[in-house]
Image (cartoon, rainbow, N blue to C red):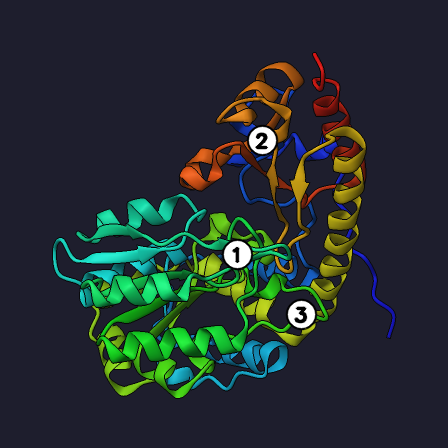
Amino acid sequence: MSIEPVRALPLEQLRERTSEKWREYDADVLPMFVAETDFPLAPAITAALHHAVDLGDTGYTASRNPLAEAFAGFAQRRYGWTVDPSNVRSTADVSMGIVEILRRITQPGDRVIVTPPVYPPFYDLIAEAGASVERVPLVQTETGWELDLPGIDAAFAGGARALLLCNPHNPTGTVHPREMLAELAGMAARFGARVVSDEIHAPLTQPGVTFTPFLDAAPDAREIGFAVASPSKAFNLAGLKCAVMVTAGDRTSAIVRGMPDEVEWRTSQFGMLASVAALSPESDPWLDGLLHTLDENRVLLAGLIDEHLPGARYLPPDAGYLAWVDLTALGWGRNPAKRILRDAKVAFHFGPAFGEEGDGHVRINFGCSPEVLRDALARVGALVGS
């Protein structure tokens, strides 16, 4: 079966949107910072939301709804992961799920490991849960990034009680291999620690790359792990507020089941309906088309960086639509996105927000049209040598 690529909407139409991506900066700025995409909704989602509006189906999200079964079906089809729907519970978004889990597996002041450069809200979520951050940076190799397992082992030995995992990793797009996740799980189990795995970018893993859900990596992972996931990144549903918390062990499942009902009541009705549509087999062709388009864009971006930003370093991600680009060689300082925004009118995400490992870096959202990518890189390239 041929794959029909998903194409971005025209820029003039996108500027009618009122979301963060399109309202943070003036209209002369190309926004490529926050993780929103420029594509139309999958048809099944549009149909589900229109139907709900036509019915006035805007009440409370039912305690009995098809979300858990939809997620389990998606996990089986896309990852080969068997999920028990009874171990799936919803909440408003992945960040909220992380905080609610951390509150129940840590005590005030406990240390939680993060692996920078990493999604900036991780630092705040740990603090919100009452814990403190312990940094164990990724190790950069010639071919990508990987978890520093000896460093994580030392942190657990020193008393860290949990690790907040980004799987796949944001901003590098790294898909952690099964054997590494299995070793991490065994390590945490030996020290009586827990792993909370943020798997929001998992649906965006490129064909030819194998995504391993943390809970499916090894028996130890099922006993000590929690996964938090949502179709919101892949299907651009962040504003609809719906995510799932998934467990596989008796003790971890009891922790999530023991959360107050209010945690689940925070799930949006529209978010639930849209997520069920996104996770259905009907949306698989759209997702395959999106991955095809993102593959084209990540390759295009590599060529544009070579053309316009000599000396910049970029490894195309294995998952997602976010590019982690090292601009240190251009001499634009610790936070080059500031100059780029001011002088080129292109908004990239500030690298240092991801940790000190982000100094000299920018994160570029390439979930857009090729024309926007070309325009953005040409604008930035015009600054070279100036």
Query: Can you tell which quarter of the image residue 276 is in?
Result: bottom right
Residue at the right extreme of this rendering: 2
In the displayed structure, 332 sits above or below 64; it is: above
Q: What residue type is labelled 3?
A: Val
Comparing labels 2 and 1, the label whose residue is closer to the camera:
2
Residue 354, position as x, y percentages in the image: 44, 41
Q: Earlier in the sequence, mark 2 or mark 3?
A: 3
Residue 55, position as x, y percentages in the image: 53, 60
Q: Which amino acid does label 1 sit on?
A: Ser
Element on which disc 2 rests: helix
Q: Name the residue under label 2.
A: 328
Residue found 77% across the figure and 26% down from its top: 378
Q: Left of 64 or right of it: where is 359?
A: right
Q: Name the residue under label 1.
A: 232
Q: Left of 358 or right of it: where is 190?
A: left
Residue 110, position as x, y percentages in the image: 16, 58
- Alpha carbons under labels 2 and 3: distance apart: 29 Å
Q: Left of 44 or right of it: where is 373?
A: right
Crowd around label 1: few <14 · some 14–19 · many ≥20 (10 Å): many
Residue found 87% across the figure and 70% down from its top: 2
Q: Which amino acid does label 2 sit on?
A: Thr
Residue found 79% across the figure and 40% down from its top: 370
Residue 209 numbered mark, or none:
3
Q: 203 or 6: which is nearer to us? A: 203
Q: Earlier in the sequence, mark 1 or mark 3?
A: 3
Residue at the left extreme of this rendering: 108
Residue 30 numbered mark, or none:
none
